Image (spheres, rainbow, N blue to C red):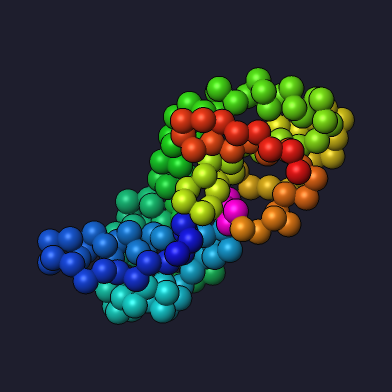
Amino acid sequence: MRRGDVVPAKKSAPSFKSLHRALAILSSFSFSRPRLSASDIASYTDIPKSTVHRFLRIFVEQGFLEETESPGQFAPGLKLFELGNIVHQNLDVRLSAKSPMDCLAKAYNTTVHLVIRDRDEGVYVEKVEPVGQHVHYSNIGNDFRFIEPFIFGHQCSIFSDHSTIYFFLF
């Protein structure tokens, strides 16, 4: 299972059932599915649509989700953005990797990505563009599977397993 894949709500002890459902609903959203309806979420999570509606109402009230300009469509809200930025800013590996990334970008005149490995996937957490080079499309926070080599092209990437930084030039 890929990080970011929707995990149907688990059958668990009653005290945790709501928590599993809430997390399954939030996990329904991804870069490829940034806006979802209650029906979409119910389909992805196997949670009854009426229950999804109750959760959506709470998530909207608390700022974790927002209803978009299209009625019945929901998207991640500013509270999730804030929490994601807290995670991003507290990744110490970003600070440790910044100088080597700058050097690699300059030496090879290519985009350098910092990717943290999470099982068989990676998450882009930082990138450096060389001066004067056109910007390469990538989303910080986006994920990919390591088994898809076409992702890299001729880019230089830095990998970390949270204890060691690995440099690879593709």
Q: Does residue 56 show up magenta in the picture? A: no
Query: Where does the image place residue 114, in percent across and percent down from the top left?
Result: 61, 36
What segment carries the magenta color?
Answer: 142-146
Query: Where does the image place residue 24, in percent across and percent down from the top left?
Result: 35, 64
Give the residue drawn at x 54%, y 36%: 160
74 and 121: which is toward the camera: 121
Q: Does residue 145 show up magenta in the picture? A: yes
Query: Where does the image place residue 91, in percent across and percent down from the top left?
Result: 47, 31
Can see residue 147?
A: yes
Which residue is at the far right?
132
- Magenta portion: prevailing SS class: strand
Quadrant containing the C terminus in the rendered view: top right
Give the residue drawn at x 21%, y 71%: 11
114 and 136: which is toward the camera: 114
Give the residue drawn at x 27%, y 73%: 51
Quarter where residue 12 is shown: bottom left
Give the residue drawn at x 68%, y 47%: 138
- Number of labels in the image equals 0
Q: Is residue 132 above or below residue 42?
A: above
